[in-house]
């Protein structure tokens, strides 16, 4: 959680960050890489300790999201599932809230 906090601080006052980070200094990009690496290493270690196949879990999550958020309805939108489907939340939550 601490490492995520350190990563979040980098973006806290940046607003929307464009692809490739134009305008960022090399030192800022290096610092970002270090913090991203810290988070990645902790995540990989945590998944190992918990016995979770992180690759399989990520692929499964992407499959579930593809069903839950179809491209035709969702591309370019940040709306919640119930907002773009027009339903009242009566669809099954395929990811059990995760």
Image (cartoon, helix red, strand yellow):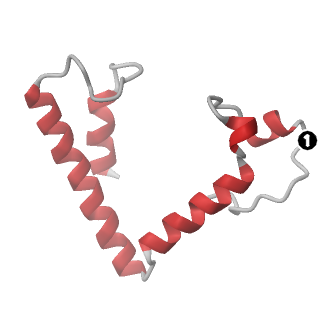
Q: Residue furthest front?
A: 72
Q: Depth check: 27 or 74 in front?
A: 74
Of residues 19 and 86, which is closer to you in this image?
19
Residue 16 x %, y %? 41, 21
**Residue at the spot 20% in from the left edge and 38% down from the top edge:** 32
Q: From this view, report whether residue 50 is shown above or below residue 57.
A: below
Pinpoint residue 83: horizontal percent, then vertical percent.
80, 33
Name the side, left or right, on which 22 lies relative to 25: right
Percent from the top left, x then y, of residue 95? Answer: 68, 62
Task: Please count the marks in the image.
Answer: 1
Location of the C terminus (image quadrant):
bottom right
Toward the bottom, the furthest residue is: 51
Assign a secondary structure to mark 1: loop
Which residue lies under the disc numbered 1? 88
Up the image or down, 69 lies above or below 59; here it is: above
User: At 16% from the left edge and 46% from the top edge, which residue is drawn?
Assistant: 34
The quadrant where residue 20 appears: top left
């Amino acid at each position: 959680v601490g490492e995520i906090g350190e990563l979040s601080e980098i973006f806290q006052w940046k607003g929307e960050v464009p692809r490739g980070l134009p305008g960022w200094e090399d030192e800022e990009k290096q610092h970002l890489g270090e913090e991203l690496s810290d988070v990645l290493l902790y995540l990989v270690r945590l998944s190992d300790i918990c016995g979770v196949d992180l690759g399989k879990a990520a692929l499964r999550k992407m499959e579930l999201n593809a069903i839950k958020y179809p491209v035709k309805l969702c591309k370019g939108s940040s709306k919640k599932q119930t907002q773009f489907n027009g339903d009242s939340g009566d669809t099954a939550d395929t990811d059990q809230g995760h």
